[in-house]
Image (cartoon, helix red, strand yellow):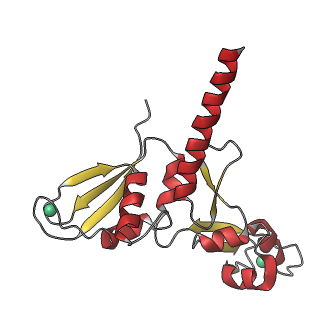
Amino acid sequence: MGHNISHRKQEEIERSRRVAELTSYLVPGWRIDATHTRIVPVETVLGAHHRGQLVLLRCRRTDCRRRVEIDLRSAVQAGFGDRPIAWLVQSLRCQHWNGCQLEEASCTYPRGVPLVAYLQHDDVLVAITCAHCRTRWLLPPRRIIAGLKAAGRGDGASGILEMGTKIRGPCRRCHRSGFEAEVIWPKRP
Ligand SMILES: [Zn+2]
Ligand SMILES: [Zn+2]
C-alpha cells in the first residue's frame, strides 16, 4: 500500500515537472493538452491570429471561384475570437443559387512553422547550416528556443523560416555569420 502511494506520488511529481517545463515554452495561440504531455494549437480564431496564420478559402463552384483571405485581426476585433475557424468560413459563404462551396484551401505560416509546434513531436531536430562553410549542427527545438530567449531574439513563436536571420553566430568554424535552418524528421523504421 505504502509502496503504491509513493509510486503515485512519484508520477505526480513527474507530471508537474513536465507541465512546468511545457509551460515555460508556451506562447499565445498554444496550450497544453488534456493529457498534460503536449503543446497543441488553440483551435479558435484568436488562436490562429496569435499564431500569425494565413487562412485562405476558395469556393469550388465553377461560376463563383471566390478566393477569400480571412482577416483574422478584424474578426478578433469584432468579438469573434473564441469562435472556431469553421464558423468564420460559414459566415463568409456567398449567395450562390445552388449553395456556396466555400472551403479552406490552405492554412499556412508565412514566417514558417513556429518552433513551439515541433515540441509535440519527439525526436524532431532542427539542422542549422552555416551558409558559408556548410558546417551543420543538429539541435532539438527546445534548445533553439532556449537560445533565442537567452539572446532576446525570439521564442517558441519564432518561425523556422526566420532562423536564418535570428541566429547570428558567428560560425564556430569559419567565423562568419549567416545560417539556414531546416527541420529533420525522424526516419520511419
Ligand atoms: Zn461561392
Ligand atoms: Zn561557417
Q: Where in the figure is residue 115, as x and y percent of width and height?
A: 47, 59
Residue 93 visible in rendering: no
Residue sitting at x 51%, y 58%: 116
Task: Please state the total of marks drawn on the protein image.
Answer: 0
Which quadrant is the N terminus positioned in? top right
Measuring from the top left, give residue 7's x and y in whole percent. 63, 23
> In screen coordinates, is 130 left or right of 2?
left
Q: Which residue is drawn at 57% across and 60% down?
A: 26
Residue pushed farthest front? 2
- Residue 171: image quadrant is bottom left
Residue 134 seen from this side: yes
For the C terminus, which image quadrant?
Answer: top left
Q: Which residue is drawn at 60% across and 36% down?
A: 13
Vertical comparison of 46 with 140: above or below: below
**Horizontal arrangement in the rendering, residue 110 relative to residue 105 (left or right):** left
User: Which quadrant of the figure has residue 53?
Assistant: bottom right
Q: In which quarter of the image is residue 77?
A: bottom right
Asked if 186 appears above or below 24 in the picture, the reply is above
Foreground of the two, 151 or 172: 151
Rendered location of residue 180, percent (x, y)? 29, 64
Residue at the extreme right of the image, as rendered: 97
Q: Is residue 119 above or below residue 77?
A: above
- Residue 112 or residue 91, whichever sits in front: 112
Q: Position of residue 142 (x, y in %)?
A: 43, 53
Q: Is 119 on the left-hand or right-hand side of 184?
A: right
Closest to the observer, 19 or 167: 19
Determine the residue located farthest toward the left in the rendered image: 174
The quadrant of the picture showing ligand 1 is bottom right
Side of 173 relative to 151 (left or right) = left
